[in-house]
Image (spheres, grey):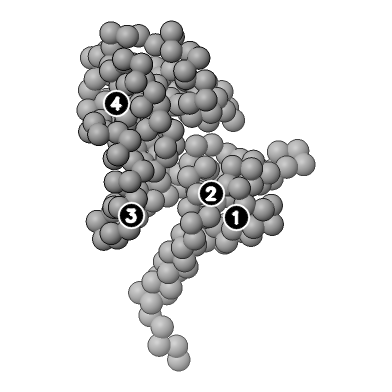
Amino acid sequence: MSSVGPKQVIFERLAEIAQAFGHPGRLELLEHLAQRKRSVEELTALSGMTFANTSRHLQILRRARLVDTERRGKNIVYRLAGNNEIVSLMKCLGLIGERNVAEINQTLNDYFHSRDSMEAVSREELARRLADDLVTVLDVRPHDEFASGHLPGARNIPLAELECRLSELPVDTEIVAYCRGPYCLLAFEAVAVLQAKGFKAVRLEDGFPEWKAAGLAVEAAAAV
């Protein structure tokens, strides 16, 4: 007679999910999929991994039921399975790491806080400012990610285009920039550019996936 009880069965399955999170490449793939659905080819280009490694990591995530697939013509497209729950779990993982791992805090100080000394705007505060029409929200992700979903009323100027399109932004209104998530550098770089040009600019504390996972309103320009 088996001595494995229901709690042990649940813990074993939970441990399998935790193991699927246990690789930096897979965490990056999840971050990219939190923006929108993508093919293996797209994820390979974004991650910098080989096609074979990308496929292998996606299969591990799929076995853990963290991603699902759908067929579009001849292509297989991946998406998060339970978008909000996975984004929230990644957010919690980051918070635990920031609290417990000295190297993470040092990296944050060296590459993030040193670039932007101003305190980030929380989701709650940004929602209030949006309701009062006090800010311009700037999405600096690529156009395809913006089209799939973005904050209400956000303007999309990818970071690579920002310096050439500064005339499109108001000089008398605070700008709040956001990107893919709390460890994405796009918003940090955008704020640095804007501040250097005399704009009043700050960043959102995390990114679009966390905003959506919190149940806040989003808009989409097209189905992607």
Q: Which mark is residue 58?
A: 1
Q: How crowded is mark 4: few (under 14 residues within 10 Å), some or many (20 or more)?
A: many
Q: How far across and how far down the image is residue 47, in percent? A: 58, 47
4 or 1: tag closer to the N-terminus: 1
Q: How far across and how far down the image is residue 164, in percent? A: 50, 14
Three-letter residue code for mark 2: Leu
The residue that disc 4 covers is 202
> Measuring 67% from the left and 53% from the top, which residue is drawn there?
50
Q: How crowded is mark 2: few (under 14 residues within 10 Å), some or many (20 or more)?
A: many
**Residue farthest toward the right in the current orientation of the protein:** 74
1 or 2: tag closer to the N-terminus: 2
2 or 3: tag closer to the N-terminus: 2
Q: Choose mark 1 or mark 2, whichever is in front.
A: 2
The residue that disc 2 covers is 29
> Would you say the residues marked 4 and 2 are in contact, meaning their CB atoms lie under 8 Å apart?
no
Report the quarter where the N terminus lies. Answer: bottom left
Query: Relative to 48, does residue 17 appear above or below in the rendering?
Result: below
Query: Relative to 101, does residue 202 appear above or below in the rendering?
Result: above
Whether residue 112 is visible: yes
Query: Relative to 31, does residue 101 appear above or below in the rendering?
Result: below
Pick whichever, 55 or 51, lies toward us: 51
- Which quarter of the figure has residue 116? top left
The residue that disc 3 covers is 104
4 or 2: tag closer to the N-terminus: 2
Q: Choose mark 2 or mark 3, whichever is in front.
A: 3
Secondary structure category for the residue under label 4: strand
> Would you say the residues marked 1 and 2 are in contact, meaning their CB atoms lie under 8 Å apart?
yes
Three-letter residue code for mark 4: Val
> Would you say the residues marked 3 and 1 are in contact, meaning their CB atoms lie under 8 Å apart?
no
